[in-house]
Image (cartoon, coloured by chain):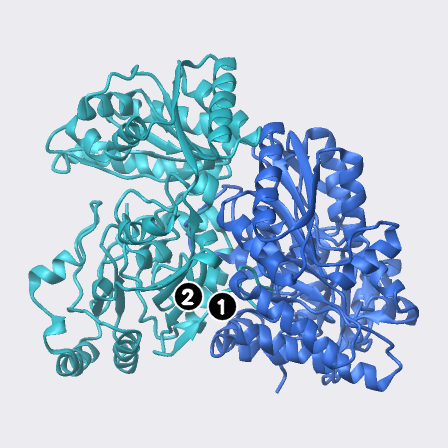
Chain colours: A blue, B cyan
C-alpha cells in the first residue's frame, strides 16, 4: 500500500505564510477543518492528510503571488482541481497550502480554424465540451470523472477515446505554468509542432504538481465527426476478445473506442442499467467518420470478431441506442459497487503491450479468485490498459489485506510483462513503490530534475517519489 | 546568422581521453582530418568545426565506456547519425569526440502484434521500412533525407506524414539512453501509454544530444493501409490553397499528407521531373484507408477545393501515378537548385497556427521578392509548417547577406504570429538567437535541466543555448 506517513512540517514557515495569505486573500482563504479535509479526500483508501488552508485564486497573477509567498517561507503548495484523482495526489503530508483552481474556470479562447482552445485549469471536460458543441468541435479525452483540465494535465489522464485521439500527452499544445519560484512561464507557442529546445510541455504534463502549477492550457480539439456508430460483440473467453482487439488495431481500423468488460462487469452493468447482455466477455466499440466509413468500420470489425468466435455482434448508428450502451459502460463504477452494497471499489491501472493483454487479464482474474476477491474488470484494451477493481469492505481487515496484496501483485505483474503500473491514474502516493521497479535508474534523473527546478521541495511534496 | 564561434577547448582532457580511447578502440577511432571534417559537415553554411576524433561504437556498452572516459576528462561528446541535420548539430565548437552510430544499425525486434519495434540509433528510416515491408508494416516519419532514427529522435524530426501520424514526439515509445555520466537508463516500458512519473522519453526526444546519447529506440509502427490515393489541385493564390487546407482539416478528413508548392516550386519540379503542372500554387495530397474510404476522402477534398476556386483537381489510386507525383515532390530540393546552377539552398523552417499560414506564406514570398531572392516554397501545410529556401550563390556577399536577413526576418515573423522558428529541424547552432524571443523564461528552465543532468556540459556543448 501507499507510503502515507506524515512528513516533517515547517511550522514557522506555515504560520508565517498563512498570516500573509490571510491578509491578501481574506475570505478566499479558508482554514475550516471540513473544507481542508474535503480537499484531501481521495476515492481510494489513502488516509486523509489535509493542508493547513485552502485558497481560491482567480488569476495567474494570484497563483504566482501565492507560490512566491510559499516559496519565501518554504511552505508546501498542493494544486487541486476536482479531487477525483485516485492515488492521493491532493493529500498534504507535510501540510501547506492547497490551491483550489475552481474559480479559474474560464474558457479563454477557441480557435476553430486551428482546432485548438485555451482554458484555465479549473475548466472541467464536460464544461468544455458543452461550450464547444455549437461550434461542431469536441475535446476527446474522457477519464471517468468530470475532472478539471488542470488535474487531467497533471496526471496525464486519458480514457476511452485514447486509442484514437491519444492521451493528455498528445493533446496539450502548450501550458502556462507558475514555477516553484513563482515565475510565470509559457512552455510553447500555439504551433502544432516544434523542434525548439526541450519539450517542457510534455515535462509538465504528468508531473502531478511537483514542478509547478499549471495556470493555462492550450488544447488540441477535434471536429465532431459527421457520423458515429457503436458495436458490441460477446466472446467465450477473454483471449478471444483480446485477439479481436489485436486484429482490429493491426488491420488499421481507426476505432475511436474499444472497451472490454469481463463477465463480472457485464453482470454488474446488466443489473444496474437493466440490460440483458450475455454475461461473458464483451467488447464495446465506437467508430467515428463519414456515414459510409462508420458503417464499413463496424462491419469490418464484425467479420474480424466472427473469425475469432465472437457472437451477438450488433452495430448501430442510432444515437439513442449508442448512448444507452455507453452510459451503461460509464456507470460501471457505480454498477460494480451495487453488487456488494456498503463496499468500495479499489482502483488498479495496469497497462501492458497488447500482445500480453490476454495473459495479464487472465492472470489477474485468476489471482483475484485465488484471493477470494470479487473484482470486475473493464479496460481501454486498444491501449492495453485495464482496471480490475476489487470491491471490498474496508472495515474487514482480511478483505482489505487481500485487496492490497492483489494491487501489489498486479503492478508487479504488469511491469514483468513489459508494461506499467499506471496507464492513466499517476503515481501520487499510492504507486511510489513500483516506480523504481518499473523504470530503474531513470528515477534518479527524474529526482535530479525535481531537485533542480524545486530545490526546496515545496511543490506537492511526498508525491511520485519515495521519501526514503 | 548562427553563433558559431569556437568555444574554449580542454586540451589536457582531450589528449588524455584520446589516448585512452585509442588504446581501447584501435582502428574504430579515427583522427584523420577528412574524416573529422566530413563528420562536421552540414547542409547549411554553418562553418565546419570538426571534433578531435571520430569513434564507431558497436554496442550500448561501448557507448557508455566512451562517455565515461569523456566524463572523467570533461571532454565533449557529439553524437552523429547520417549528418543530414540542418542547423550545425554535428559541429564540435569545443572539440571532443564524435560518436558515429553507423555501426549500431541493427533492428533488434519487431512486435507486429504491438505495432512497435526496437532499433539501434544508426538504423535509417529507409532501412527500417525496407525491413518492415514484408510484414505489412511501416514507420511513417519521413524527413527529406534518409536520416538515422537516432538523429531523427534527437531533432524531433517529422516530414510529410506528420499531419496524420504525428512527429517523432508522438512515435517514440521508449528510449535507452547513455547519460552524461555514462550510465545506461531506459526511459519507459513498451506500454502504449503511461502515467508513471515525468515523461523522460519526451525530454530526450528533441534534446539534440545535449542530455545524453540515445542507444536504442522503441518506435510505434503502422499497418500498411489497404489502399492509398493521391490527389492534386491548383489554386490561383496561396490564400485559396491555405483555405482549402484549413477546411480539409476542420472537416476531419484524415489526410495522410497535404503539401503546398508555390508557383516557383512547381516551376522547379516541372523542369526537373518533366511534368507539366500549372505553374500556380499547388496542393498535393495522399489518403490512406480502405478502398472506399480513400476514394471518398479524395472526392470530399475535391469538392472542398472546388468551393475555394481550385482547378485541375485529379485523384488516382494508381501506384505508378502516385509515386511519380510524390517523387517529384521529394526531388524538390535538387529541382530547386537546378534552377540556379552552382548555388545552394538555404533552409528555413517556420511553423505557425494554421489560421496564420496564408499570412505568413504571403509575407514570406513578398519579403523574398523585396530582397531580390529566388526562393521557392514547399510546406507541410496541414501542420502550418513550410520551408521557403533562398537559392543563393554562397560566394556573393550581397546575396548571402540578403538570405541571412531573410531567415532572421522569417523566424521573427513566425514567432510574432504565435508560431515557432523551427517546426522540425531543431535549434542546433543556427537558431539559437530565436529561442528566447520564442519561449522567454522557459529557456531558463531548460538551462537548469541541462546544468542539472550534465553539470560539466560535455554533451554536445554549444547547441540549443546561446553561450552568452
Does the CB distance between marks 1 and 2 fall below 8 Å? yes
* Disc 2, SS: strand
In which quadrant is the C terminus of chain A drawn? bottom right
Which quadrant of the view contains residue B213? bottom left
From the image, tell me which residue sits under label 2: B175
| Rendered residue at 77%/54% (across/down) | A278
Compare marks 1 and 2 and give the one earlier in the sequence.
2
From the image, tell me which residue sits under label 1: B188
Q: Is residue A93 above or below residue A66?
A: below
Can residue B95 be seen here? The reply is yes
Residue A142 appears at what percent x and percent y? Answer: 70, 50
Quick one: label 2, few (<14), some, or many (20+) residues within 10 Å? many
A160 sits left or right of A36 in the view? left
Q: Nearer the viewer, residue B57 or A219?
A: B57
Residue A68 appears at what percent x and percent y? Answer: 67, 65
| Rendered residue at 75%/33% (across/down) | A318
User: Disc 1 and disc 2: Cα gap in Å?
Assistant: 7 Å
Which quadrant of the view contains residue A15? bottom right
| Rendered residue at 51%/30% (across/down) | B293
Amino acid at each position: 500500500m501507499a507510503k502515507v506517513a506524515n512528513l516533517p512540517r515547517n511550522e514557522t514557515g506555515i504560520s508565517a505564510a498563512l498570516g500573509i495569505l490571510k491578509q491578501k486573500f481574506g475570505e478566499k482563504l479558508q482554514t475550516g477543518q471540513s473544507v481542508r479535509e474535503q480537499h484531501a479526500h481521495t476515492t481510494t483508501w489513502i488516509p486523509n492528510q489535509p493542508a493547513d488552508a485552502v485558497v481560491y485564486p482567480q488569476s495567474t497573477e494570484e497563483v504566482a503571488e501565492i507560490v512566491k509567498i510559499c516559496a519565501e517561507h518554504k511552505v508546501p503548495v498542493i494544486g487541486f482541481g476536482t479531487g477525483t484523482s485516485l492515488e492521493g495526489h491532493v493529500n498534504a503530508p507535510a501540510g501547506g497550502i492547497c490551491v483550489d483552481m475552481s474559480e479559474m474556470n474560464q474558457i479563454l479562447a477557441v480557435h476553430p480554424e486551428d482546432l485548438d482552445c485555451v482554458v484555465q485549469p479549473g475548466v472541467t471536460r464536460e464544461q468544455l465540451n458543452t461550450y464547444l458543441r455549437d461550434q461542431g468541435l469536441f475535446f476527446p479525452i474522457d477519464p471517468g470523472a468530470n475532472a478539471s483540465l488542470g488535474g487531467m494535465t497533471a496526471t496525464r489522464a486519458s480514457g476511452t477515446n485514447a486509442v484514437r485521439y491519444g492521451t493528455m500527452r498528445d493533446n496539450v499544445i502548450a501550458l502556462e505554468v507558475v514555477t516553484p519560484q513563482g515565475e510565470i512561464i509559457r512552455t510553447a507557442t500555439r504551433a502544432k509542432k516544434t523542434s525548439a529546445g526541450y519539450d517542457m510541455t510534455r515535462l509538465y504534463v504528468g508531473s502531478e504538481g511537483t514542478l509547478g502549477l499549471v495556470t493555462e492550457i492550450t488544447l488540441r480539439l477535434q471536429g465532431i465527426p459527421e457520423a458515429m456508430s457503436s458495436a458490441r460483440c460477446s466472446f467465450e473467453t477473454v483471449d478471444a476478445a483480446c485477439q479481436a482487439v489485436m486484429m482490429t488495431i493491426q488491420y488499421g481500423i481507426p476505432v475511436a473506442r474499444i472497451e472490454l468488460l469481463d463477465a463480472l462487469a457485464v453482470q454488474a452493468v446488466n443489473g444496474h442499467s437493466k440490460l440483458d447482455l450475455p454475461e461473458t466477455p464483451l467488447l464495446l466499440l465506437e467508430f467515428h467518420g463519414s456515414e459510409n466509413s462508420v458503417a464499413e468500420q463496424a462491419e469490418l470489425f464484425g467479420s474480424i470478431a466472427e473469425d475469432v468466435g465472437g457472437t451477438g455482434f450488433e452495430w448501430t448508428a442510432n444515437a439513442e441506442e449508442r448512448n444507452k450502451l455507453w452510459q451503461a459502460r460509464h456507470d460501471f463504477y457505480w454498477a460494480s459497487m451495487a453488487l456488494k452494497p456498503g463496499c468500495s471499489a479499489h482502483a488498479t491501472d495496469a497497462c501492458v503491450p497488447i500482445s500480453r493483454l490476454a495473459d495479464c487479464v487472465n492472470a489477474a482474474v485468476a489471482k483475484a479468485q485465488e484471493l477470494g476477491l470479487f473484482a470486475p474488470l473493464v479496460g481501454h484494451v486498444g491501449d492495453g490498459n485495464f482496471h480490475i477493481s476489487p470491491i471490498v469492505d474496508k472495515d474487514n481487515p482480511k478483505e482489505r489485506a487481500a485487496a492490497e496484496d492483489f494491487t501489489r501483485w498486479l503492478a508487479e505483474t504488469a511491469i514483468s510483462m513489459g508494461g506499467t503500473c499506471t496507464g492513466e491514474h499517476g503515481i501520487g502516493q499510492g504507486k511510489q513503490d513500483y516506480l523504481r521497479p518499473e523504470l530503474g535508474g531513470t528515477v534518479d534523473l527524474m529526482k535530479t530534475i525535481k531537485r533542480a527546478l524545486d530545490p526546496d521541495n515545496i511543490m506537492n511534496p511526498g508525491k511520485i517519489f519515495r521519501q526514503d
